[in-house]
Amino acid sequence: MSDLTIRPRADEHMQGCVQALAGVHAEDRYPVNWPADPESWLTPRSMLDAWVAVEGPAVLGHLVLTRPGEALAAEVGLPAQRLVSVARFFVRVDARRRGVAAMLLDKAITAAAADGLRPVLQVEAGATAAIRLYERAGWRCVGSSTADWTTADGRAARMRSYVAPSRTNPDETSRGKRV
Ligand SMILES: CC(C)(COP(=O)(O)OP(=O)(O)OC[C@H]1O[C@@H](n2cnc3c(N)ncnc32)[C@H](O)[C@@H]1OP(=O)(O)O)[C@@H](O)C(=O)NCCC(=O)NCCS
């Protein structure tokens, strides 16, 4: 039986996160350029929360929630204070198609809803696995824009913006408040 669980990221997970990221970078060019300091890349300044998917001592996946920028909030059409942004999201290459990413996303939505917040994200249009994952999980594409960086195959990155399906805030269920 699998002991796959989603946990808050701790210092003890960082080495496994960086190892997993190295494999994802080699396979998917995510991120496009290998960061000089991967631990810092995994910990953006605007980070609010970070989770890992673990199985025993192994880190299988990673996701952080950050404060979204004003441009993304404008695209979604909601105030930035009511949103959180999914970032640094990946699953180890040898742990794919086991529902790890879906579990991490579900955790992000539930945790955000508990704070009355709605998750949003941006994904490069060529990331077909991620786009299928989001659309299958009910995320809605609300716009697209051209970014200021170039993909591994030399295209100007085209970003699609998504908003998570609404989820009832567990503290507000008696009033049925949905975010
Ligand atoms: C996108 C990513 C996180 C998916 O991780 P995963 O753990 O394999 O995804 P899951 O097993 O939870 O997939 C859930 C559903 O998403 C869809 N999906 C996931 N990967 C897919 C793929 N390669 N092709 C088609 N559909 C896919 C499927 O509908 C899948 O359900 P199914 O397996 O029952 O058909 C992983 O491929 C990854 O790390 N990619 C590189 C980094 C990246 O693109 N991150 C997103 C940045 S915005």
Image: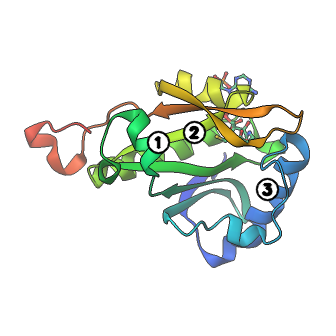
Asked whether the beta carbons under mark 2 and mark 1 sit within 8 Å of each other, the answer is yes
Which amino acid, mark 2?
Gln
The numbered disc on residue 21 is 3
User: Which residue is at the far left?
Assistant: 175
Kind of element beneath mark 1: helix
Q: Earlier in the sequence, mark 2 or mark 3?
A: 3
Q: Earlier in the sequence, mark 2 or mark 1?
A: 1
113 vs 168: above or below: below
Q: Nearer the viewer, mark 2 or mark 1?
A: 1
Q: Quick one: 60 or 132, which is closer to the camera?
A: 132
Tally the numbered discs: 3
Kind of element beneath mark 2: strand
- Give x and y (percent) for residue 24: 82, 48
Q: Does mark 3's beta carbon lie closer than 8 Å to ligand 1?
A: no
- Badge 1: residue crowd in 10 Å (few <14, some 14–19, many ≥20): many
Which amino acid, mark 1?
Leu
The numbered disc on residue 148 is none
At x 38%, y 46%, the residue is 110
- Badge 2: residue crowd in 10 Å (few <14, some 14–19, many ≥20): many
The residue beneath circle 1 is: 72
The residue beneath circle 2 is: 122
Q: Nearer the viewer, mark 3 or mark 1?
A: 1
